[in-house]
Image (tube, rainbow, N blue to C red):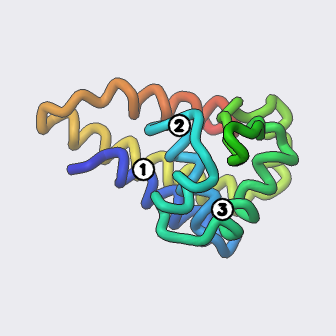
Amino acid sequence: MDLDQVFIDEFGALSMDIQASDLQGRIQMFFRLIKQRVTLEELAETFGVKNQDIDAALENFRVLGVVEETEEDGQPVFIFKGYPEEMKEIVDLFPERKKRLETSVKTLEQQVEKAQEEGQNVDKHVAVLKDVKKDFGIS
C-alpha cells in the first residue's frame, strides 16, 4: 500500500467534496508528505494538469500564507509554510466541512494502523495527521 498516495487521494476527495476541486487537498498532502519546496511545473506534471490549474488551486494557499511564492530561473517556486493559527477559527465556521475533515482523518488513521500492522514505517504519516489535527482544530 502506497500510504502517501492514500493520503493524497483522501484529501483530494475531501477537497472535491467541500470545494468542488480535488487539487487543493492533493497539493496540501503533496507538500506535507513529499516535497515542501516545489515548482509550479513539478506540481502540474505530478497531477497531470495545466500550470494554470495549479496556479488557481494555490490561490487560497497564497491568501492564507500557507505557501511562500518565490521565483528561481524564471519559474515560480512554492514553499510550504504551514497553516496559520486562525485556520482553526475558519474551520469552526463550517461545521459540516469540519465533520467531513474529521471523517477523512479517521479514515487515514485506520489506513496508517493497517500499514503499521503490515510492517510499514508510518512515522511520517502519524506526524502529518498530528499536524492536520493541530492546524484545523481536530481532536
Q: How many marks?
A: 3
Asked which secondary structure carries label 3, the reply is: helix
Q: Is residue 79 left or right of residue 93?
A: left
Q: Is residue 42 among what the camera can see? A: yes
Residue name at image x 75 percent, y 57 percent:
95
Label 3 environment density (alpha carbons within 10 Å; few <14, some 14–19, many ≥20): many
Question: On screen, 97 above or below 28?
Answer: below
Q: Is residue 88 among what the camera can see? A: no
Q: Are marks 3 and 1 in contact (CB under 8 Å)?
A: no
Q: Earlier in the sequence, mark 3 or mark 1?
A: 1
Residue 132 occupies quadrant: top right
Residue name at image x 24 percent, y 28 percent:
121
Q: Earlier in the sequence, mark 2 or mark 3?
A: 2
Residue hosting label 1: 7
Q: Quadrant of the C terminus?
A: top right
Q: Position of residue 33 (x, y in %)?
A: 46, 37
Question: On screen, 76 above or below 134?
Answer: below
Q: Which one is in front in this view, the residue at disc 3 or the one at disc 1? A: 3
Residue name at image x 67 percent, y 34 percent:
79
Q: Position of residue 84 (x, y in %)?
A: 80, 32
**Amino acid residing under circle 3:** Ile
Q: Position of residue 4 (x, y in %)?
A: 36, 45
Question: On screen, 134 above or below 26?
Answer: above
Asked which secondary structure carries label 1, the reply is: helix
Residue 137 occupies quadrant: top right
Of the pair 46 and 122, the residue shown nearer to us: 46
Residue hosting label 2: 32
Q: Are marks 1 and 2 in contact (CB under 8 Å)?
A: yes
Residue hosting label 3: 54
Q: Earlier in the sequence, mark 1 or mark 2?
A: 1
